[in-house]
Amino acid sequence: MDEDTDDILNNIIDDDDDANIQMTPAELIQKMEEIWINEKFAPELLPHEQEIVDLVLSQISAMEDNVETLPSADFKKGFYQLEIDRIRFVVTSYLRHRLEKIETYVLHVLKEDEEREEAYLSEAEQQFALKYKEALEEHFDNATMFYPGLPFEDWKSNFVRPNMNSFVFLKAKSNVEGVVVDRGQGDDNEIVDIKAGSQMLISYKGVSDLIKKGDLRLI
Amino acid sequence: MDPEEVEFLGEKHLVSIVPSFTSESVHLIQGDYGPFRAGLPIRVPLWVAVNLKQQKRCRIQPPEWMDVDTLELIKTDEKLSRVFTKMPSEFYMVEVKQLLGCASDDIPRADEIRTIVKDIWDIRMSKLRSSIDLLVKNHEMYAAVDNLTMMEINSMRPLLPHALDHIYRMKTFQPNVGSQSQTMSFSTHSRVSTSFQS
């Protein structure tokens, strides 16, 4: 029974032709947690990691099928279920944070995504964002329609942008050099080097590229 | 971030248990643990250990650093040092809370351990407060926070990043003609949201 579990888990990783990510299930879950925390603390929407999410979800459903076949008197069944719940929490929290950001910054996100070649939104998220934008427009138009010709602030040109200067805690996975820290008073910019394994509190603006590349992670 | 979420992350840490049952290995997605032999110690994640203990199927062995003498040493080090010393475990608060919560009978001198860990926490917290005081007074824009565990960093959220954000805004404030002082408008036509996540 347990050898089958192992086989099934390995097969799912190997047979996935679309993902050129070859990692063990343990590494996959570790990466999922990292993405979760990055998305949680970053002020802007990060590039989507739909492949990782799909892999994790397929792992969960494979494990769920397995758990059903186990005899329910076996107390170890509880552990499989517990682990499934833990992983599912991480995935849902990650997706919820992304949706929250899309909803708050809907105009900004859609505009940025058009200009970017590699979209930060996955297809499902794109559809959600478009529909949400239309619903918002309809709602505002209906709400202000009570008196024609009433001047109101054009909300569509007045975006809500995420605050790129907000401060984040980060941990360096490899040595980074030349992070620019804006001291805010004129052109007094400082350049900081960060050693691998050290932790820093710093403005998000200077490190956003490195986080997206993966040299740093938020904590 | 809630303290419970920090606990969630800390629960993945491995801890030693002595199971009172025998069974073959458990193949979790995150790794295989086992086989379990009654009486032989084995390392499992903290959440597995707590669960087994609650079902009364194992005894938990305290980690090496969780005894009074080691903790006393750490506490003295922390008192004497001006910077933060490296803690024996990245999630010492989580482990102490979970293990002493469910397995205080397995851990010798549990109450003393609890007091010492609380003392260490208080010392580190007061160091943190004074260094934040310095950080804000000197209008520094970044800080190294090595050797701080996640629980301690989390205790400063959302206050510290938000405060630094306000300092930065005050530094870069450029009054526009005809702008309201409320909306802190920059020269582009867009509204910047305040820190959005804790």
Image (spheres, helix red, strand yellow):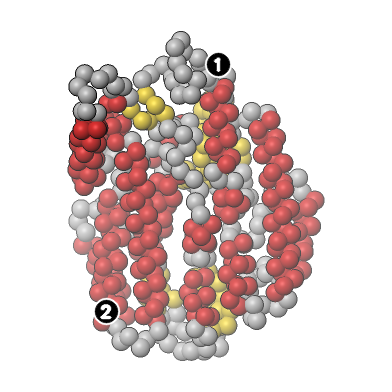
**Residue pictured at 35% horizontal, 41% vertical:** A101
Provide residue A150's location: percent of width, then percent of height: 25, 20
Pointer 1: what residue?
A: A186
**Residue pictured at 47% horizontal, 37% vertical:** B195
Please report whichever mark, 2 or 1, sits nearer to the chain's N-terminal start: 2
Provide residue B94's location: percent of width, then percent of height: 58, 63
Q: At numbered mark 1, what does the secondary structure look like: helix, strand or loop? A: loop
- The kind of residue tagged 1 is Gly
* Of B100 and A191, the residue lying toward us: B100
Q: Is residue B120 left or right of residue A93?
A: right
Pointer 2: what residue?
A: A68
Badge count: 2
Judging from the image, mark 2 belongs to the subunit labelled A
In the picture shown, does residue B193 fall above or below B101?
above
Provide residue A129's location: percent of width, then percent of height: 24, 40
Judging from the image, mark 1 belongs to the subunit labelled A
* Of B195 and A179, the residue lying toward us: B195
Q: Is residue B74 left or right of residue B98?
A: right
**Residue pictured at 80% horizontal, 51% vertical:** B80
Picture quadrant of residue B140:
top right
Report whether residue B139 is seen.
Answer: yes
Provide residue B43's location: percent of width, then percent of height: 52, 75
In the picture shown, does residue A174 fall above or below B71?
above
Q: Which mark is residue B36?
A: none
* Residues tagged by mark 2 and mark 1 found on one chain of the structure: yes
